[in-house]
Amino acid sequence: MKRAVTMGNFDGCHLGHQALFRTLKAVAEVNGLTPTVISFEPHSNYVLHTPGDPLLLTTTEEKREFIESLGLEFLVLPFTPEVAKLPFDVFVRQELIEKRGVCSMFFGHDHCFGAGGKGNYETITAAFPELSTAMLSIVLHKGERVSSSAVRNALLNGDVARAQTYLGRPYRLSGTIVEGKRLGHTIGFPTANLQVEKYKFLPKHGVYVATARLPDGNGGERSFRAVVNIGTQPSTGNQQLAIEAYLLDFSEDIYGRPMVLDLMAYLRPEQKFPSLDDLVRQIGMDADTARNYNGNHWAE
């Protein structure tokens, strides 16, 4: 198999990454090549610098699902200290050309790899004239560079609409439903406690409108409007940080099952209420607000 590839961490798979993916796919198909995205696991900074920095906008499986949905092949390249020390020309020859049949490479404007970061568009084009290479320019949105950092900054401010603009889709939290304190069951609002991967980036603590997606058992999915609280639940004595989703019009037992939450809008900060009655009243109001949310506006 002959491949055209682009390679990197691609955290977020934002609009800048997507522009690269589209170009890769279009050129590869014209030339009879398999368009392939190669992503590092773990994030290269976790090996070169500090594990967990940066926190991940997209886990490997979230990247896989999204990239494959675009019609591209997705490969994971284990990133180890040994791989990090390889000179870029050795890496390209061994890992790309010989092992994976790469004959064409596409670069983001600032991508570099190999020992000392010396592998980039210019050096690889010079060292491997047999490779077809291309580099894309910076992607701007209303004059601002689209980047993973811009997405994180928007989410830190609870601005999920701005993050969605950069991502081209809602920000996603995915994981497994685990058992929590079950307080929600006692107050009439049973919640699903979502456990995400260790280094997943979480937005500003607070309450969100979301779309919850559950597998239907037949290869498809069911979706429900949800109210999601991200935080420490101060009204119930400050619990551990949790992601609690109340699914509207839903009452099944789903412990142990996978769930996806697509964040649609930020409702309010997390707050401590004087009593459980006040908390119940507010959750009811949040549920009504979520039910009336329609795209980017609130139904009258």
Image (tube, rainbow, N blue to C red):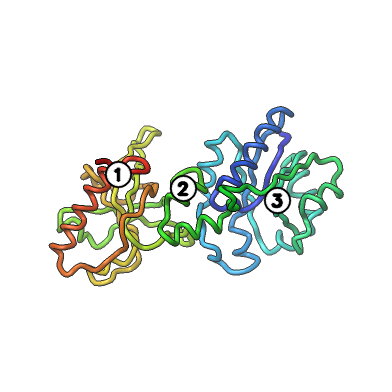
- Circle 1 sits on which residue? 298
**At label 3, which amino acid type do we have?**
His
Identified at 40% across, 52% down, the residue is: 175
Residue 47's place in the image compared with 265, above or below, is: below
Image marks 1 and 3: residues in contact by CB distance under 8 Å: no
Q: Is residue 169 left or right of residue 282?
A: right
The numbered mark, 2 or 3, whose residue comes first in the sequence reads 3
Name the residue type under label 1.
Trp
Dot 1 crowding, Cα within 10 Å, few <14, some 14–19, many 20+: few
Amino acid residing under circle 2: Gln
Which residue in the protein does label 3 denote? 109
- Sequence order check, earlier mark of 1 and 3: 3
Residue at the far left in the pictured view: 277
The residue that label 2 is drawn on is: 164
> For the residues marked 1 and 2, what is the alpha-carbon distance in whole angstroms?
17 Å
Vertical side of 165 occupied by 44: above or below: below
The N terminus, quarter of image: top right
Determine whether the residue tagged by mark 3 lies in a helix, strand or loop. Answer: loop
